[in-house]
Image: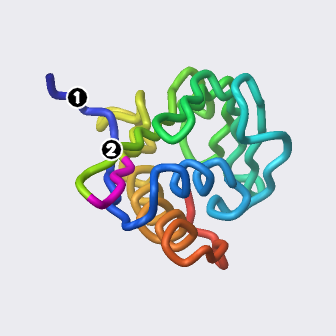
């Protein structure tokens, strides 16, 4: 079954537990203002970057070392006409063991090519996942710069 939802994959040497813990440490890899808890089922947190991006996420699925799902319950993206474009979308992290490595499949379910922010948002997610999250997982280093979404 094919999907048009934006997705990208990382393959790292760290264990699924290390990857899971890094993803849940949202403040260390998603640069901006984050308020609320980000690591347990039903936790809710907001993300804000200046006036450009505001979202509220609820953790709707948390399977230790395997999967994390955030439901975007509110959004306000100032750089697109439909400011609430992300509302109702899901941000999914699937974690699987692959031989001696761990694969992270990131999917933003609902971020599809017909979305107004698809090009800019998918580009930003690619950078955030492949640089900020990768660096946190592999080197235990926090994000040092903003990569726009």
- 37 or 50, nearer to the observer: 37
Q: Is residue 79 left or right of residue 142?
A: left
Bounds of the magenta segment: 100-104
The C terminus sits in image quarter: bottom right
Q: Which mark is residue 7?
A: 2
Q: Is residue 54 left or right of residue 36?
A: left
Give x and y (percent) for residue 61: 57, 24
The reply to whether dot 1 and dot 2 touch (C-beta < 8 Å) is yes
Judging from the image, what secondary structure is the residue with disc 2 in?
Answer: strand
Categorize mark 2 by other alpha carbons within 10 Å: few (<14), some (14-19), many (20+). Answer: some
Name the residue rendered at 33%, 44% in the picture: 7
Give x and y (percent) for residue 55: 69, 38
Furthest-front residue in view?
100
Furthest-left residue in view?
1
Give x and y (percent) for residue 4: 25, 32
- 114 or 107, nearer to the observer: 107
């Amino acid at each position: 079954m094919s999907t048009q939802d934006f997705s990208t994959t990382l393959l790292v040497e760290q264990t699924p537990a290390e990857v899971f813990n890094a993803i849940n440490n949202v403040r260390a890899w998603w640069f901006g203002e984050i308020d609320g808890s980000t690591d347990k089922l039903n936790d809710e947190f907001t993300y804000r970057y200046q006036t450009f991006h505001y979202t509220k996420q609820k953790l709707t699925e948390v399977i230790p070392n395997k999967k994390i799902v955030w439901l975007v319950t509110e959004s306000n993206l100032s750089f697109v006409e439909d400011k609430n474009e992300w509302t109702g979308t899901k941000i999914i992290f699937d974690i699987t063991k692959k031989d001696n490595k761990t694969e992270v499949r990131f999917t933003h379910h609902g971020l599809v090519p017909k979305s107004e922010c698809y090009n800019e948002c998918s580009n930003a997610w690619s950078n955030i996942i492949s640089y900020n999250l990768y660096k946190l997982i592999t080197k235990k280093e926090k994000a040092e710069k903003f990569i726009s979404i």
